[in-house]
Amino acid sequence: MKITRFEEIEVWKKARELTRLIYQASADGTFSKDFGLRDQIRRAAVSVMSNIAEGFERDGNKEFIQFLSIAKGSSGEVRAQLYVALDTGLISIEQFKKLHALSEEISRMIGGFIRYLRQSEFRGRKMKNNNLESGT
């Protein structure tokens, strides 16, 4: 199946869900008042889905891989901040386990996507257009 829009990418959908859940968890109680951690974990979650989308729109595998790598790093950042939220009593162990597991799944999926793109013959529309223009 050919993916034509970033909204069709399964890992982007998972990242969107993670972002929604992070926003929910950080909107309640004491967590909502810890502006630094609340804002940082939200930015990290948004970064995951944003970098997947931006990389896809760049039209080249090399750039897409670079943006996926940034997204994977942001997913790790979310997990690190979840530990802070857990250790300071801002989230329950149940919330932590659910969000941590989803973030780990996203990291694994991104890693698999990167491996696939590195092995793929397709290099994106940008490379295809360059090849057409140069006559190859």
Image: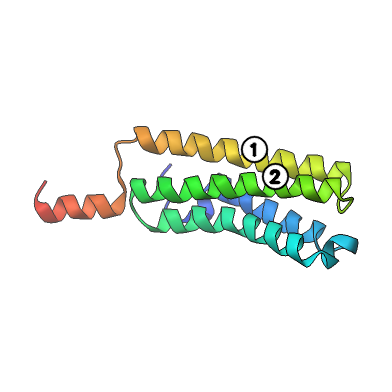
Looking at the image, do the residues carrying marks 1 and 2 touch, with CB atoms under 8 Å apart? no
Do we see residue 14 in this rendering? Answer: no
Q: 36 or 23: which is nearer to us?
A: 36
- Quarter of image, res 90: bottom right
Percent across and percent down for residue 96 are 81, 44
Mark 1 burial class by Cα count in 10 Å: few <14, some 14-19, many 20+? some
**Residue 42 appears in view:** yes
- Please tell me which residue lies in front, 29 or 59: 29
Separation of disc 1 and disc 2 at Cα? Answer: 11 Å
Residue type at mark 2: give it.
Answer: Arg
In which quadrant is the N terminus drawn?
top left
Q: Which residue is mark 2?
A: 79
Residue 37 is situated, as x and y percent measured from the top left of the image, at: 75, 59
Quadrant in which residue 31 is drawn: bottom right
Q: Residues within 10 Å of mark 2 (few under 14, many from 20)?
A: many
Q: Which mark sits nearer the N-terminus, 1 or 2?
A: 2
Residue beneath label 1, please?
A: 105
At horizontal 48% and vertical 38% (from top left) the residue drawn is 113
Does residue 120 lie above or below 77 as drawn? Answer: above
Q: What colour scheme was applied to this rendering of the protein? A: rainbow
Q: Which mark is residue 13?
A: none
Mark 2 element type = helix
